[in-house]
Amino acid sequence: MRLIILIGLLLLSSQSLATVYRWVDDTGKVHYSDEPKNNAEVVDLNENTQNNMTINTPTKINTTPTTETKINYKISIVSPREDTTIRDNNGAFTVSVSASPQLPRGVLFTLLVDGVTTASPQVSNEFQLTGINRGQHSIVVNAVTQSGKVLASSSPRKIFLHQASVFGPAKKPK
């Protein structure tokens, strides 16, 4: 059985060595085929068809280091100011941000309140917040690319949010 398979493989491999023909058409384009055409010549594939490349080494090498100028963006929270007390029963306030130098196109601002992203990324430099619970909060604004890379972050800003008591003003004991 093995002998029959070996003979079959040898017969198939001999057929795969087909003759290659080369010819040039009327427009000057060179064609290759396994079928003979008018004015076609047989291509001898037994020739050395190895490609040889030579690499020219430069005679003068630039030793000056190239330094990429990395732009340092600065993000700062304009309002609310540090240690500000905000009095709002709905937990609503506005966060304004400034960036310098001007951020590239496509960069978005993200707002984190107590380390949690509170607002969706946006181009605008003002965030309108509502529903923030009373107490002390830390606010940070990041400038991020669309791929999620953080270009710059503001320093944390501490604020206090006060809300009126549900029970009303405290009563004095009699």
Image (spheres, rainbow, N blue to C red):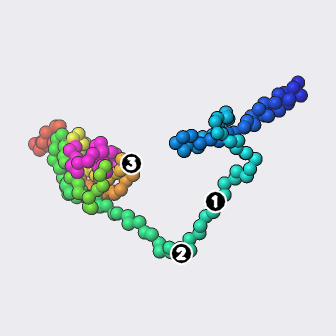
Q: What is the span of residues highlighted in magenta in the rendered image?
A: 107-129
Q: Is residue 146 visible in this depiction of the protein?
A: yes
Location of the N terminus by quadrant is top right
Of callouts 2 and 3, which one flags the residue occurring earlier in the amino acid sequence? 2
Disc number placed over residue 148 in the picture, else none: 3
Of the two numbered discs 1 and 2 in the rendering, the one whose residue sits closer to the viewer: 1
Question: Residue 78 appears at what percent x and percent y?
Answer: 20, 57
Location of the C terminus by quadrant is top left
Image-based side of 123 in relation to 36, left or right? left
For the point 53% across and 75% down, which residue is it?
60
What amino acid is found at the position of numbered circle 2 in the picture? Lys
Q: Residues within 10 Å of mark 3 (few under 14, many from 20)?
A: few
Inspect the magenta stretch and tell me whether residue 120 lies in it: yes
Of the two numbered discs 2 and 3 in the rendering, the one whose residue sits closer to the viewer: 2
User: Which residue is under mark 2?
Assistant: 60
Of the two numbered discs 1 and 3 in the rendering, the one whose residue sits closer to the viewer: 1
- For the residues labelled 1 and 2, the Cα–Cα distance comes to 21 Å
Disc number placed over residue 53 in the picture, else none: 1
Badge 1 vs badge 2, beta-carbon distance below 8 Å: no
Asked if 61 appears above or below 48 in the picture, the reply is below
What amino acid is found at the position of numbered circle 3 in the picture? Gly
For the point 79% across and 34% down, which residue is it?
14
